Image (cartoon, grey):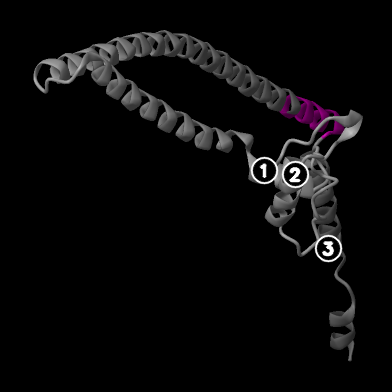
Amino acid sequence: MSDGQDTDAPDPLSQRSRDQAYAEAQQADAASAPDIAEALREFSAIGRAGFKAANDVAKALRILVAADLSLARSAFGRTLALTGVAIAFGASSWLLLMATLIVAMTRVLGWSWPLSLLLTALVSCVATGLAGWMATRYFEHTRMKATRRQFARLGLGELADFMPDADSHESTEAAAERVADATSATEPVKKGLGVDVTPP
């Protein structure tokens, strides 16, 4: 019995060593815990580094945009100049080609001068009409019809009052055709201040 009672009693040395180990662990935790001032300094340093990185990115982007705009401006000027040169030489070569055809028709085929001039003028008129018709067709793509219809469906732009809502099952193309038909009539559709609506 006495041996059992001795084994059940707590050992004062082991209890003291546990308390000492617990106290040392708390001191180690307190020493390893970061100081608030140090944490604020680190947070401030991280914020400054992020701001500097964002500033560097913005500066690089500004330099890129400025260089790109300068290149585009220079290229646009040169494109205009070279387009003028191409038009001048193209027109002169067309005139010389027509003159050569007129001379060939009068001398080789024996046609009269008025008939030769009329034929070459008709060829030039057909080429002009065809080029103008194709230019008009391609110019229609610059009106961004599909984008304007979708913006109008979202309630933006001059066509918003004439397009179906975003949750409507009606297609914007059908509504746009309806507006275009009404605009092409004798009484065009008006927007604010009595201005005609541009057909979609």
Q: For the residue labelled by badge 1, is the local secondary structure a helix, a strand or a loop? A: helix
Left or right of 65? Residue 124 is left
User: Please, is residue 12 above or below residue 133 in the view?
Assistant: below
Give yes or no for contact between labels 1 and 3 (Cβ–Cβ under 8 Å).
no
Which residue is at a point 87% across and 65% down the rendered structure image? 12
Foreground: 61 or 44?
Answer: 61
Residue under label 3, please give it.
13
Foreground: 77 or 126?
Answer: 126
Give yes or no for contact between labels 1 and 2 (Cβ–Cβ under 8 Å).
yes
- Magenta-tinted stretch: 35-46
Left or right of 170? Residue 108 is left
User: What is the quadrant of residue 107 in the picture?
Assistant: top left
Which residue is at a point 35% across and 9% down the rendered structure image? 88
Q: Please name the predominant secondary structure of the magenta segment in the image.
A: helix
Residue 150 visible at all: no
Dividing the image into 4 quarters, which one contains the C terminus? top right
Residue under label 2, please give it.
151
User: Of the residues under marks 1 and 3, which one precedes in the sequence?
Assistant: 3
- Amino acid type for the residue under numbered disc 3: Leu
Alpha carbon distance from label 1 to label 3:
85 Å
User: Please, is residue 83 above or below residue 136 in the view?
Assistant: above
Q: For the residue labelled by badge 3, is the local secondary structure a helix, a strand or a loop? A: helix
Residue under label 1, please give it.
147
Q: Nearer the viewer, mark 1 or mark 3?
A: 1
